[in-house]
Image: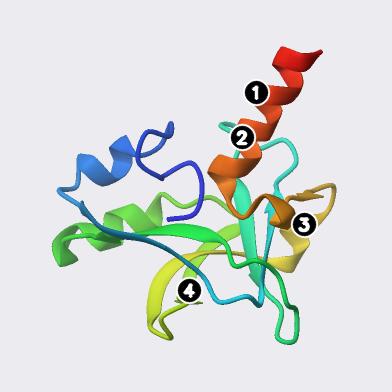
Amino acid sequence: MVGAHLAGQPLNGQLIERGARLVATTSTTRDYRLFALAESVPPKPGLVREPGFDGPGIEVEVWAVPEDAFGSFVAAVPPPLGIGNVRLVSGEWVKGFICEAAGLAGATEITEFGGWRGYRRSLQTATVGA
């Protein structure tokens, strides 16, 4: 999980209600970019792998979703998001959220924050400092 489904985030209940459990918090390899998608409710990020890109890696959570609940979870994923292969810093490949290139229209790159939580904290800091 990379955004609104992370522990404590608005859509995490979709995992919990399916009996999923948090296995690890880690990061992707450095060839991923993260974008805040435009007009997404609730706000969601889009994760895109770009071979050759050398970023910070993106914080992700690995969740174990029961096999009999995985299909209903995937069916609820709205475009431009999808489920695909995501490579972790450990070298392991897991199933996770990825974003279609078309979904990046109007999106803001947030890779520099290292993940969704870092980006959301930056918004809170900006609001408090305003």
Q: Which residue is mark 4?
A: 84
Question: Looking at the image, is mark 3 or mark 1 earlier in the sequence?
Answer: 3
Q: Nearer the viewer, mark 3 or mark 1?
A: 1
- Residue lying farthest to the front in this orientation: 129
Q: Residues within 10 Å of mark 1 (few under 14, many from 20)?
A: few
Q: Quadrant of the C terminus?
A: top right
Figure check: 96 above or below 105: below
Q: Are discs 1 and 2 less than 8 Å apart at CB?
A: yes
Q: Are discs 3 and 2 less than 8 Å apart at CB?
A: no
Question: At numbered mark 2, what does the secondary structure look like: helix, strand or loop?
Answer: helix
Q: Are discs 1 and 4 less than 8 Å apart at CB?
A: no
The residue sitting at 76% across, 62% down in the picture is 102
Q: Amino acid at mark 2?
A: Arg
Question: Looking at the image, is mark 1 or mark 4 earlier in the sequence?
Answer: 4
Number of numbered discs visible in the structure rendering: 4
Question: Looking at the image, is mark 3 or mark 2 earlier in the sequence?
Answer: 3
- Left or right of 54? Residue 87 is left
Report, in whole angstroms, how far the alpha carbon at label 2 lies from the one at label 4: 24 Å
Question: Looking at the image, is mark 4 or mark 3 earlier in the sequence?
Answer: 4
Q: Amino acid at mark 3?
A: Leu
Q: Which residue is mark 1?
A: 124
Q: Which residue is mark 3?
A: 104
Report, in whole angstroms, how far the alpha carbon at label 3 lies from the one at label 1: 23 Å
Residue 18 spot, x, y in % from top left: 19, 47
Figure check: 125 above or below 117: above
Answer whether residue 80 is visible to the viewer in this image: no
The residue sitting at 79% across, 48% down in the picture is 107
Q: Residues within 10 Å of mark 4 (few under 14, many from 20)?
A: few
Q: How is the image coloured?
A: rainbow
Q: Nearer the viewer, residue 43 or 28?
A: 28
